[in-house]
Image (cartoon, grey):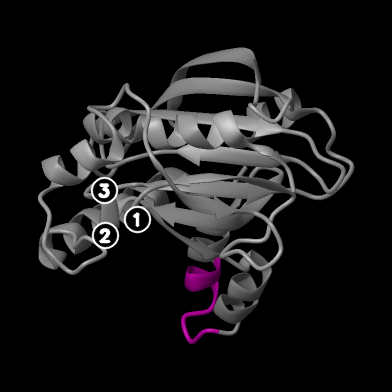
Amino acid sequence: MQVGVGSVRGGVVLAVALAAVLGGCAKSPDGDAKSASGALASAGGEGTGATASGGSIGAAGSRCELPVRFAVAKGWKARAVDAEKELSKTSKGSDGDLSGAFADAFLRQGPVTTACEIDAKPAGHIGFLRVWTGKPGDADAGDVLRRFVAAEDNVSKEKYRSVRTGGGLRGVEVEYLYTSKLLEETKKETAFAVSTPDGPVVLHLGGMDSEEHDAMRPAYELAKRTLKLG
């Protein structure tokens, strides 16, 4: 279990929130400013409806090359994360142990490391859909997901259930509450895990608060509905 994960996650959420405030309204592809509510409407509803696809990731040549592939909600922006490279860079930083501990807590959670983050801000929300991957051999998706949640710290009311993706993969999903010690607030989080020949994959949806989480949930459901082996 990582040291200080709760504090680090809280700090990251706060930084994202400040960036969103300073950055103003998100912009549509044609350059016109959109309000958050307008972007949500274009994405397909108010937190419970279907949402339009803006392309897919996971395949070779896509923004994130993964063991699986799935559709990304329209307006969301994906970028690959090389966790091992980032951890190596911070270990050589001037602040030494501090930057290394921060990076380890943010990039590694239980048996998996960050491989891709899909930013909701261009679509008018504050949060990410993150993809975490593990090494081959961790075959049981349920065990991987439980270790992932346990490593987060400050979680409660976990509810696990079996799921099947639209691509036919069997997996395990969890809904739970995360309490930030820094912000002193509790919010919803959701994740699911599947096993692949190349190792386990976890998709996690957070959000600045529970309201943002619910508003972004259609993008998560789109990913789950379209996920298949890469």
Contact check, label 1 and label 2, Cβ < 8 Å:
yes
Q: Which residue is mark 3?
A: 126
**Which one is in front, 17 or 3?**
17
Q: Residue at x 59, y 29 (%)?
A: 192
Coordinates of residue 132 in the picture (x, y in percent): 62, 48
| Residue named by callout 2 | 15
The picture places residue 52, in percent across and down from the top left corner, at: 38, 39
How crowded pointer 3 is (Cα within 10 Å; few <14, some 14-19, many 20+) is rated as many
Q: Give the percent coordinates (x, y) of residue 141.
A: 74, 28
Q: Please give the range of residues in magenta.
A: 93-100
Residue at 71% across / 32% down in the picture? 194
The residue that appears at 21% across and 49% down in the rendered structure is 124
Please tell me whether residue 201 is drawn above or below residue 103 in the rendered image. Answer: above
- Which residue lies most toward the front here? 30
Query: In terms of image quadrants, where is residue 145?
Result: top right
Q: Is residue 54 magenta?
A: no
Q: Is residue 94 above or below residue 31?
A: below
Rate crowding at label 2 as few (under 14), some (14 to 19) or many (20 or more) other CA atoms within 10 Å. Answer: few
Q: Does residue 42 show up?
A: yes
Check disc 1 and give the amino acid type: Val
Amino acid under disc 2: Ala
155 vs 97, left or right, is: left
Which residue does the numbered mark 1 point to in the structure image?
Answer: 12
Q: Does dot 3 land on a helix, a strand or a loop?
A: loop
Q: Earlier in the sequence, mark 3 or mark 2?
A: 2
**Apparent side of residue 102 relative to residue 202 in the rendered image (left or right):** left
Q: Secondary structure at mark 1?
A: helix
Determine if residue 105 is in view.
Answer: no
Query: For the residue marked with disc 3, what is the amino acid?
Result: Ile
The CA span between labels 3 and 2 is: 11 Å
Quadrant of residue 34 within the rendered picture = bottom left
Disc 3, disc 1: CB below 8 Å?
no
